[in-house]
Image (spheres, helix red, strand yellow):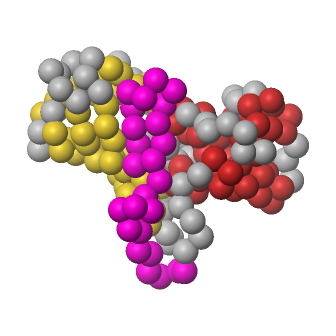
């Protein structure tokens, strides 16, 4: 998967006629790191991939899905892409990407006990929905705190920083759907 992500990044950069320097400015990811990713020498973290997707204004799933035939996409469980943060406490599985006039991504997320993950703004025009499958989750959205339990859901505009916090006695699993619409829509969980 590392090689595939690198190839996708390189193709996107060339399509947009960007230098590594310009891409680094747009994404907040260093030029050496971008170069290593393009060459398939490193596996980027969830945070790094979000920064790149946001900077390039492409859905996060762009880096996780193989090219599919339009109209119907079948993704077997064994083919679903998984991205893990550098400590292994935040794991994102790309379940599917909806293509079309209003693209969306569906993710299964696991956040280990007593851990948190900060997500930067996904940009204007991105709506995020969260549904708790197992455990408890505290979601801090731009300073507003929401306590969610198994079966609860929350939907919000994802144009502000938000933090997922698991203070429960076990790991937390939840689904995240990102719906991209409008100008400046920059995907990411």
User: Is 70 a magenta residue?
Assistant: yes
Q: Residue 92 in the image: state x and y as whole percent.
A: 41, 43
Q: Main secondary structure of the magenta part?
A: loop
Q: Pinpoint residue 101: horizontal percent, then vertical percent.
A: 50, 70
Residue 51 vertical position relative to residue 184 in the rendered view, above or below: above
Residue 130: x and y in percent read: 28, 43
Q: Residue at 50% x, 72% y: name it.
A: 100
Between residues 167 and 39, which one lies in front from this camera angle? 39
Q: Is residue 78 magenta?
A: yes
Relative horizontal placement of residue 68, taking residue 31 as reference (left or right): left
Q: What is the number of callouts on the image?
A: 0
Residue 126 placement, left or right of 144:
right
Residue 105 in view (yes/no) = no
Quarter residue 155 falls in = top left
Percent of width and height locating residue 179: 42, 55
Residue at coordinates 44% horizontally, 80% vertically from top-left? 72
Please state which of residues 60 and 182 is positioned toward the viewer in this rendering.
Answer: 60
Q: Residue drawn 49% across and 69% down?
A: 99
Image quadrant in which the C terminus is located: top left
Residue 143 appears in view: yes
User: Is 49 located above or below residue 142 in the figure?
Assistant: below
Q: Residue at the spot x=69%, y=56% of the render?
A: 8
Question: Which segment did they paint magenta?
Answer: 69-93
């Amino acid at each position: 998967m590392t090689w595939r992500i690198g190839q996708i990044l390189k193709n996107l950069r060339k399509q947009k006629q960007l230098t590594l320097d310009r891409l680094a400015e747009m994404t907040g990811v260093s030029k050496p790191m971008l170069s290593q990713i393009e060459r398939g020498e490193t596996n980027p973290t969830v945070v790094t991939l979000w920064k790149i997707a946001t900077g390039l204004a492409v859905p996060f799933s762009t880096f996780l899905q193989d090219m599919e035939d339009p109209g119907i996409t079948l993704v077997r469980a064994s083919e679903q892409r998984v991205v893990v943060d550098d400590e292994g406490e935040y794991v994102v599985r790309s379940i599917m990407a909806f293509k079309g006039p209003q693209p969306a991504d569906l993710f299964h997320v696991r956040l280990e006990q007593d851990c948190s993950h900060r997500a930067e703004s996904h940009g204007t025009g991105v709506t995020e929905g969260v549904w708790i499958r197992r455990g408890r989750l505290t979601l801090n959205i731009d300073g507003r705190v929401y306590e969610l339990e198994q079966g609860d859901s929350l939907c919000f505009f994802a144009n502000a920083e938000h933090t997922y916090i698991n203070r429960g006695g076990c790991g937390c699993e939840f689904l995240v759907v990102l719906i991209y619409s409008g100008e400046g829509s920059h995907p990411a969980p």
